[in-house]
Every structure is written in structure tokens, then in C-alpha cells.
Image (tube, rainbow, N blue to C red):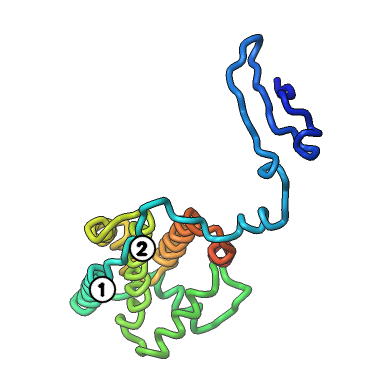
Amino acid sequence: RLVGGRNSPADSGGHPANFELYFGRGVVGFVRLQPSIMKTRPERLGALNHTLPPPAGAEQTRVAAGVVAAFVVAKLALHFTATAVTPYEMHRDELLYLGMGEHLRFWCMDFPPAIAVLARAARWLFGDTLFAVRFFPAVAGALVLVFTGLIAREFGGGRAAQGLAMLTTFCGPLFLRPSVLFQPVVWDQLWWTVGFYALARLGKENGPRWWVWLRDLDC
């Protein structure tokens, strides 16, 4: 139970300043609360929305821009080369999304219409080629690598940690296969990765911007 301490409410302007915490018959703790902390002033509530201060002595880790650029180039080169030398043609699922892009029905599809819009844009940019179909998935896979490095950086990882995080994503079959085919899978991976990055930013910056990111990604 909580019982009033030595100071009465009148001693602190209407707010009790001291509390003694009892457990059974023995005192297990003593909590001293300053009256100023207990006051709910508007400026104190507004301060909660500001950027959280970094720990003492902590420095902002830099983005390993060179490492990120190297992995992006390697990722795009790998997928574009595979597209150029592969003996296989389009996957049957890719034909579905290309057909939906040819006959856009925004509210009459079994899936979100963004991929159908990308299908039409790819054919408009590069024509009816296999490169056109595989271009946007490769770009999405490269963006997954970029945000993977950024997430490692948000957790304090330096150049080596960012490179290791991107290397595991680069070599993982779970991320290699979706980046080859024009399907919604790689876009799901990208949005989830961006969402995790927004959560990592929220751990440092309690601002509305990252909540907006999460809301838009959910939509």
C-alpha cells in the first residue's frame, strides 16, 4: 500500500512530496517525488514530442556511403547480367501483372494496383523486353540493401557492421529470388524494411514524421 509520508499536501502546494512504500509490515522502499515533477504543465507535455537527446558521449554513426554504393552496383549488375544471359522467358505470374497493366482496373484487382502501374511504366520505358519486366524488381532489391545498411547504422553499427548486414541480405536466397521476378514479394520486403527503419528512428526521435511513414506504409 501507499501511505502519505512526512510532508502533507499543504507543504508542497497541494501535491504530496514524499511517499513511503510498505509491503506487509516491512518498509521495502522510499520514494521521494519532487512537487515540480508531479505538476502537469503544458510545456512539460509538449517537450515529449521533441527529439530525444543522445546519450552522453555518444556520436552519430556515419553512413558508409562507399560500401552502400558498392553493394547497390553489385546488386543491379548481378540481376541485369542474369536477365541478359538467362535461357528462361517470363514467369507465368509476371504475365498476369503485365496483363493487368495493359487493362488497368484500379478497384477490380485481386492485389494492390501499384504493381500493375509499374508494369505499364516498365513497358512504356523499355518496351516488351525481359529487361523491362525485371528492371523494377532489381531496383527494389537494391533499395532493400540500402535500408538494411541504414538500420544497422541506426543501431550504432559502423562501416564493418553496415557492410556485414548488407552482405547477408545480398547473399540470402530469401532476398535474391524475389528481386529477379516481377511479383509483389520484393515490394513487400521493401516496405517491411522501410517500416523497420522508421521504428529504429522512432527509438531516437519521437517526432511525428516517422509515425507518418508507418501510417503511409500500412496504407
Identify the residue under disc 2.
Answer: 150
Report whether residue 103 is seen: yes
Residue displayed at 74% across by 33% down: 16
Up/down of 78 relative to 15, above or below: below
x, y (%) of residue 170? Answer: 26, 62
Q: Is residue 160 left or right of residue 142?
A: left
Q: Residue placed farthest to the front in the image?
A: 11
What is the quadrant of the N terminus in the image? Answer: top right
Task: Give the SS element for disc 2.
Answer: helix
Please tell me which residue lies in front, 14 or 151. Answer: 14
The kind of residue tagged 2 is: Leu
- Neighbour class for label 2 at 10 Å: few (<14), some, many (≥20)? many
Up/down of 105 relative to 38, above or below: below
Q: Is residue 74 left or right of residue 111?
A: left
For marks 2 and 1, the one nearer the N-term is: 1
The number of discs equals: 2
Residue displayed at 37% across by 77% down: 136
Up/down of 138 relative to 201, above or below: below
Q: Residue placed farthest to the left in the image?
A: 85
The kind of residue tagged 1 is: Ala
Residue displayed at 27% across by 67% down: 64
Task: Give the SS element for disc 1.
Answer: helix
Identify the residue under disc 1.
Answer: 69
Image quadrant where residue 71 sits: bottom left
x, y (%) of residue 179? Answer: 33, 67
x, y (%) of residue 61? Answer: 33, 61
- Neighbour class for label 1 at 10 Å: few (<14), some, many (≥20)? some
Image quadrant where residue 74 sits: bottom left
Report whether residue 79 is seen: no
Q: How far is mark 2 from mark 1, CA to CA?
A: 12 Å
x, y (%) of residue 155? Answer: 37, 53
What is the quadrant of the C terminus in the image? Answer: bottom right
